Image: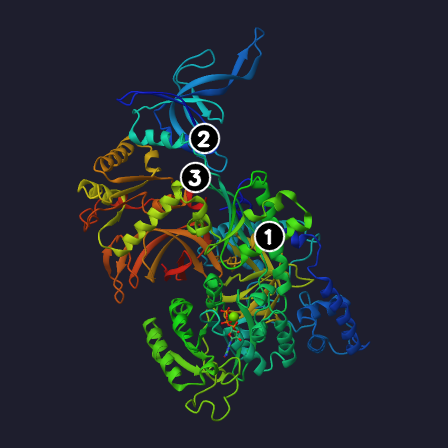
Amino acid sequence: MRLIKQNIERDGSGSVTLYPEEPEDMWHAYNLIRPNDLLRASALRRVTTESSTGSTASHRVQTTLSIRVTGIDFDPQAGQLHVAGRIAEENKYVKIGQYHTLDLELQRNFTLEKGEGWDSVALDVIREAIDPQKRADIAAVVMQEGLANICLITEHQTILRQRIESNIPRKRQGRSGDHDKGLTKFFETTLETLLRHVDLSAPKPILLASPGFTAASFQKYIIDTATSTGDKALLANKSNFLVVHSSSGHLHSLNEVLKSPEVLARLKDTKYARETRLMDDFFTLLRKDDGRAWYGPNEVSKAVDKSAVGRGGGILLISNSLFRSQSVSERRRWVSLVDRVNEEGGEVRILSSQHESGKRLEALGGIAAILTFPLEDLDEEEEAEDTEDTPNADMGNLQI
Amino acid sequence: MSRHRIKNVDLDEDDFYDSGEDYDDGDDGLTVEDREQLSRGTKQVRDVLGPDIAITDQEIQETLWHYYYDVGKSVTWILNQRASSQPKGSKKSKKETKATDTVATPTKKAEGPSPDDLVTAAQSGKGGNKASKPSTKQASTEKEKNEKSAVAPAVEVPKPKSKNINVLAEYEKSKRKNAANFVVIGHVDAGKSTLMGRLLLDLKVVDQRTIDRFRKEAERVGKSSFAFAWVLDQTSEERTRGVTIDIATNKFETEKTNFTILDAPGHRDFIPNMIAGASQADFAVLVVDASTGSFESGLKGQTKEHALLVRSMGVQRIIVAVNKLDTVGWSHERFQEIEQQASSFLTSAGFQPKNISFVPCSGLTGDNIAHRAPDGLVPWYEGPTLVDELDKSEPASRALEKPLRLTIGDIFRGGIQNPLSISGRLDAGHLQIGDPIVAMPSGETAYVKALDVDEEPAEWAVAGQNVVLHLSDIDPIHLRTGDVVCSPTSPIKNISTLTIKLLAFDHITPMHIDVHRGRLHTPGQITQLVATLDKSTGQVLKKKPKLVQPGSVARVVVQLANPVPLEAPSRIVLRSNGETVAAGLLE
Ligand SMILES: Nc1nc2c(ncn2[C@@H]2O[C@H](COP(=O)(O)OP(=O)(O)OP(=O)(O)O)[C@@H](O)[C@H]2O)c(=O)[nH]1
Ligand SMILES: [Mg+2]
């Protein structure tokens, strides 16, 4: 994303104009735009004209619209962002108050003004979004016999591109040939699909992850196929197919894949490599059960209240899904929590809910903290506040 | 829930259930080699049978295929078949096949309602069956089908006819031998497959020639010590790597019992397969490697994990085969050391001492497997051989009267006439040829066109038996391993939220896990730790704990990514990052 223009006042008013360049930028925009914001972007609007004879004709016009946002819909697979709202500025095609859904597009500016003003978290999103350092995306196939998940790992998201399921007859007395045949067929389908989703002309690592030997056999299948068909693109990418271990072919095994030495060597200083490590640290501490690791909205808020997430090792882990809450007061609550931890010298990590470590955090309710000193019983005395305490299961995330 | 589940799973592209085509493309799944064997075999069978027996090539080939081209067995089968089913002296019609043979076999009294009646009952919600939610859907699926066939009865292949056998009464009468499945478990390379290969040789299920051939071939890939294991390890991958990957199923019988071996893989990556095997087992044989250091490292690895798993899946009896004692000169001391350590571990895992037994043996040399070790080799052991110990197993009680349940273990082409077959163990209930069945979660109906029990064609099957069902009237796209086959009248429900009472093997927090039940495994997430419970009384100790410590009992809520057929009280295993983190009971 490119920053085209910024005029934000100290009080948080003002606007930012951004230029999205790649699909990932839609994800950033998704984390930036909130209900009640003012969004200005170019749009296609269907207008109906009535001729003098009374017949009507409808055609589309390109125009720039400003809407007061009412809802945001993000499609991670397609990388599309649909922002619904009501027209805030009249022009010759539209009237104030009419509904319009803006589909943000790549290579087209949009301008945003925050309804509640620019807060630290929103500014952070911009900082992250306009970071010019680009890291290559990685494609991965997480598989087991009969199941393959083809996905793309970017800096901020893991995107499931395609799931392949295929019934492979199991080994049976005297009929092992059926199994081998089924496996080959499965590899064939998986490779065909992979090639449709990954552009080999721009070489990038393609991770093949599985338990047992499936990934290794698939790698061999790819190389054999490349050799026998003389496929130039495949041959050129031979060394890019890396075999990694995972304990299953289900998508959440990506979490293991991202921790593998093969991946870490290449992506050592990516945001998510750090976050993966942090989540591991958190779980290690949690298992010790010594009062230094807490999760859940109320527990973490209390820990921050007691100044236990500050200088000297305090870390707040928070999923960006919390800042996408529909409720303004909810959002304010999390922003102020972040600001307080920052003020007290603690470290704040905002994890992407679309990345593996973020999903682990989501399972814990989207928020966790490593404390500078142990606190006991943060979860007591609040039996009444049941609902908030329940980690929210984001099943949408589970599936991707 | 859509019935076209597989299609929906895919995001935007066409559907990838590739084996679907495999069934449709007219390819009969035979290799050139197969075909050669078939035509050679057909001729040989004809020669033996002589000109008096009228039989089509197709029938011969079907039989040959079934017996893996064994001419002798095929001839015996054909002759027996003729003897039992042919009215004496009459010329036989050529069209006759096992599945549609309704003339020759004496008709059993039609006692139960016909499947069609059952279906009607399901449609109208009568028959005392409080139709559960999915059942209505099944019923309507069923209805459509029935209506279709009612409108145009003569067009398609007729539905398999049921003989309306009173299966339970037949089963009572049949006085079969006791049947038992056992799973062979233990750390990788403990010698499980070798032990079973040896057992099958010594009981003459496999002949020496086969072993010799395996040895020669194995030598060629530098794995000569795996000759016995090759009896079980049959895929090229298993053989070249010298590792079992998937469950191998083999049969043998003693005077008392028909046994089915489920040889599990020891490697930790294949535990999902091991779980599938264990879920079908009545008891377990735990193989431990007695050689120096190996027992100890195994105990930290899958010896322990496997034992915990089978126990938590309901297995009560365990026979420990203290294997490879040849490598330590049949040391009594070593045996005692292992016996002592394994006993204490197994008791702590929940096995009762009276259900644990130990047999010192060597799969490689064959001592104490089917035959006693020669005099003087193991002077300190007078107990039973492994086979004798197996024979002590008590017949298990089966859920014969419960509604039909079968977890699909495999989907394959069962023969030229049977393009779509499934296998598994009947968990509950019974069925017969002609029965309609419903596969969940798809909710699609199929008919049982023919079936095998323990690899022999049969007319009916009951809970506890290992069966192959040859299906008709269903697209394979609606079937997946791990799916549950059930009766249309009381189908299992698909659920996606589970409350589980579990025993934690590791720390439990809200986290991503895989849920395993037999062949079924599916991703999910622990969303709530409801409470930790007192181990013996089940009383709540702490509500909403932040963490469940290993060894404690807790109630948790699990949310699955997709609905699957599960019902209480199923035994469930939870795994995460390749570790078994908990096992428990669906509530
Ligand atoms: N000396 C000796 N070697 C044995 C014995 N049993 C098995 N082995 C050797 O141990 C190795 C592994 O044997 P397998 O039977 O494949 O072991 P497994 O337990 O089936 O292994 P997985 O199925 O891969 O877990 C082979 O080289 C065998 O020859 C035994 O009783 N004595
Ligand atoms: Mg083995």
Q: Which residue is mark 2?
A: A81
Q: Which residue is mark 1?
A: A187
Q: Nearer the viewer, residue B502 or B238?
A: B238
Q: Earlier in the sequence, mark 2 or mark 3?
A: 2
Q: Residue at x 67, y 57 (%)?
A: B158
Q: Quadrant of residue B96?
A: bottom right
Residue A93 x, y percent position in the rendering: 47, 13
Q: Earlier in the sequence, mark 1 or mark 2?
A: 2
Crowd around label 2: few <14 · some 14–19 · many ≥20 (10 Å):
many
Instruction: Determine whether the residue tagged by mark 1 lies in a helix, strand or loop.
Output: helix
Instruction: Determine whether the residue tagged by mark 3 lies in a helix, strand or loop.
Output: loop
Circles 2 and 3 on the same chain:
yes
Distance, label 1 to label 3, CA atoms, is: 28 Å
Tag 1, which chain? A
Q: Earlier in the sequence, mark 1 or mark 3?
A: 3
Query: Can see residue B441?
Result: no
Q: Are marks 2 and 3 in contact (CB under 8 Å)?
A: no
Instruction: Determine whether the residue tagged by mark 2 lies in a helix, strand or loop.
Output: strand
Query: Can see residue A2?
Result: yes
Depth-wise, is mark 1 or mark 2 nearer the camera?
1
Q: Which residue is mark 3?
A: A155
Q: Give the amino acid at mark 3.
A: Glu
